[in-house]
Image: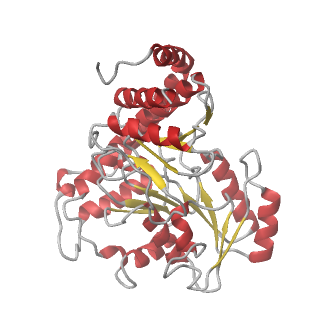
Amino acid sequence: MSLFDFSQKILAAEAHANLRIAGRFDETDHVTEQNQHKVLAAFIENRVETRHFAETTGYGYGDTGRETLDSLCAQIFGAEDALIRHSFACGTATIAAGLFGILRPGDTLLSVSGQPYDTLLPVLGLREGAGSLKESGVGYTQVDLLPDGSFDYTAIAETIDKHSPKIVYVQRSRGYTLRRSISAAEITKLASFVHANSSAVLFVDNCYGEFVEPDEPCADLLAGSLIKNAGGGVAKCGGYLAGKHALIELAAQRMTCPGLGREVGASLGNNRALFMGLFHAPHVTGEALKSAVFAAALFEELGYEVSPTSQELRHDIVQSIKLGTPEKLIAFCRALQSASPVDSQFAPEPWDMPGYDCKVIMAAGTFTGGSSIELSADAPLREPYAVWLQGGLNFHSAKAAIMTAAQAVHAI
């Protein structure tokens, strides 16, 4: 029996799902085309050349490829300036560089999208971790989103008046919650509100949201990971910061050290992958969106609660599926791994992953370790035993893996 011989129940659910999402795929293709045109224009206007792919070593002084990448990234994200580097260890490290660059002892950070993603909590000092912002004398406060997932402007205004925050922080994606993701338009509206009521910096964790909509959020500083959307499945590591020039300069001093900033940092041959990743990012994000929409429709047909639904507008690539039991959650991840192009012979096990307060299971048969723009699924083993699915370098492979996971869950 072939790996992809599915039961009649799963095939029937697939057929119904395909009918329901045809229009959504057309919408995704339209957004992808808009974003691809924007990125192509930026490459042309920044005069990207073969010489920009050349390796630099040592201090990396005068790396024209690195400088062109920064300019290219800034234009793509509609920003004054940008830092895009393979040397950012991950999305959390990229965000931390921006936060530590801006915040000083006595300052306060206000999160207006509730508690941030688990791995940022030690950075803020909300969970044990040496060298946190809290240890540096930086305060933290938060305002939760309203039940419908929108910003609580009344509470935000009151908190700004009370604490005078240096940074107002927004996490665009849902993290390990079932709240909806936040649109670029909502964040742009929030930016206007914050600037009208304070001198605070609006800082946005843009992870999983790049190229999902025709426009990126208008904010003072955006941060993201290159093993998510913006790396296009090509970048092997890294992150980006894009925003106001003065803030980028502050982050650059934290990225390396005061006095050197962005002037040092050898490319070590990574520039070509970053250029190519940015170029492919709109298309790959579109494939990931199609994969998420299909997963939502398929599991709706099978009777599971999903967020977002197959018909909702999307502001990130993440799809959550509430599976209800740890057995189904583990079965989903193991089946997805078995239908991955890399490491398909291995079975994921829940483990004590650094930065989390419970065991986490992760399925990621990826070409780049931990790359969540490639098809991956992960979840903390806690109620309501939902899985968070994201990525898919190409829809057709992702679809086969999603159906394999559905069959495994249905068999329990």
On screen, residue 324 above or below 195: above
How many marks the image carries: the answer is 0
Residue 214: x and y in percent read 52, 39
Image-based side of 128 in relation to 106, left or right: left
Q: Taking the image as drawn, is residue 311 in sight?
A: yes
- Name the colour scheme: secondary structure
- Judging depth in this view, the residue of 324 and 45 nearest the camera is 324
Q: Taking the image as drawn, is residue 316 in sight?
A: no
Residue 230: x and y in percent read 40, 49
The residue that appears at 55% across and 25% down in the rendered structure is 297
On screen, residue 163 above or below 268: below
- Judging depth in this view, the residue of 81 and 256 nearest the camera is 256
The residue that appears at 33% across and 52% down in the rendered structure is 46
Residue 272: x and y in percent read 23, 53
Image-based side of 270 in relation to 322, left or right: left
| The N terminus: image quadrant | top left
The residue that appears at 58% across and 21% down in the rendered structure is 301
Residue 74: x and y in percent read 43, 57
- Judging depth in this view, the residue of 361 and 48 nearest the camera is 361
- Judging depth in this view, the residue of 351 and 250 nearest the camera is 351
